[in-house]
Amino acid sequence: PQQGNGSTIQVSNFEKAKNKSPRHGEKSVGLFDGQVYWIQDNNLFAYNIATKKPDLIANNVSVIYGKHKNSVLIRPASSNDLDLYLLDLGSKSFTKLPFQDFYYNYDAYLNSPYLCYFSKSNKVGRFNIETGGNITFDPNFNGRSVGFYPKITDCQADFIVYAQGTYPGPGNPRNLEYKVYQVSRSKYVFEKTLDNGSFNYANAKVQDNKLYYTGGDFNNTPVVSVDLTTSKETSITQSVSTWDISGEYLVYGLKGSEFYDLTKEIFIQKLPQ
C-alpha cells in the first residue's frame, strides 16, 4: 500500500501505568464526538484539549464500547457477566443496559443509537437502544471452518462490519476475513481476506467509501485504508496495537517495545486527504 501522511499528537503518558495498558485488540481506545477516550489500569480517561492533559472520568472500567448522547457504554472491570452500563459523563451515574442477547459482550460495538453484537443464537444483530428495535442476520462463513465467532468492528445505520478468523484446511495458514453488510440491501457488499491474518488485531471501520482495517500479522499491523470503488490501498500508520477513527481523525496506540501486545502511547492523527 502507499504511505499516507498526517499530523500527529501524543495524548497519553503511560510512564506511571502499572500494567502498560491498554493491550492489543481490546476495546480500550475510542474516538467519539471528537473526544479521545482510553482505559489505563482499569481507569477511564479522556483527553482535555484545553489543558492538553488527560482527565480521569471513572474507575473500575475494563472495556469502552462507544458513546450515546452524554453517556459512554462500558463494562466494569469487576463484572464477570453480560451486563453493560451507560456511564453518564455529567453525573457519573451508571445505568444498566436492558439488553443481554450477547454470545459474548466483549465484541459488541456501539455507534449511537445502534448496538451491534453476535447473538446467543449465532447471528449478527443490531439493537437500537432508544427504540428497542432489533434486526439479525446470518454470518456468511462461505462454508469454511470458523476458528472464532465474528468480532463486530463497526455498526452504522446502513453498514455493519465484522471480522472472522477461518481455517482454509489442514496445513494451510489461518485467514482473516472482513465483511461489510449493507442493511438497506440485506446483503454483503464488500469482503476483504488477509492470508495468515491475526484475529487478535482485527479492527475495521467504513468511512467515506473507504474501509480502514488492521490485522495483517502480529509483527506488522499498520492501519490501512482501501477505497471500496477503486480498491486502492494506503497505509496510514506505523504498526499499532489498538485504534479508532471518526471524521477527520484517527486515534491509535503504538506497540510497546518491551512486549508486542502492549501499547506504548496513545496518539491522535489527522487523516491524509
Image (cartoon, rainbow, N blue to C red):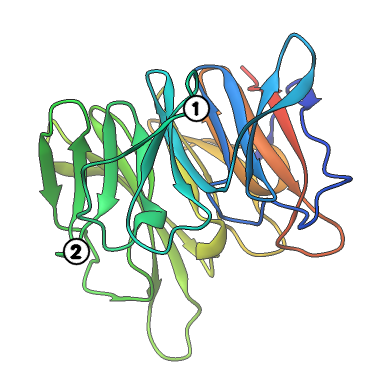
On screen, residue 131 versus residue 106, left or right, reads left
Q: Distance between the residues labelled 2 and 1?
A: 31 Å
Mark 2 = which residue?
A: 120
Q: Quadrant of the N terminus?
A: top right
Dot 2: element? loop
Single out the residue that lies furthest toward the bottom. Answer: 170
Mark 1 = which residue?
A: 92
Residue 239: x %, y % from top left: 72, 49
Frontmost residue, 175 versus 130 = 130
Frontmost residue, 138 versus 116 = 116
Dot 1: element? loop
Single out the residue that lies furthest toward the top. Answer: 50
Picture quarter containing residue 3?
top right
Residue 259: x %, y % from top left: 80, 65
The amino acid marked with disc number 2 is Lys
Residue 103: x %, y % from top left: 27, 63
> What residue is shown at x 60% (from left), y 31% (from top)?
37
Residue 83: x %, y % from top left: 33, 52
Picture quarter containing residue 158?
top left
On screen, residue 42 versus residue 150, left or right, reads right
Frontmost residue, 113 versus 173 = 113
Frontmost residue, 252 versus 106 = 106
> What residue is shown at x 24% (from left), y 66% (from top)?
141
On screen, residue 267 versus residue 216, left or right, reads right
Picture quarter containing residue 88?
top left
Answer yes or no: is residue 230 visible. Answer: no
* In this view, 188 is above or below 244: below
Q: In which quarter of the image is the C terminus?
A: top right
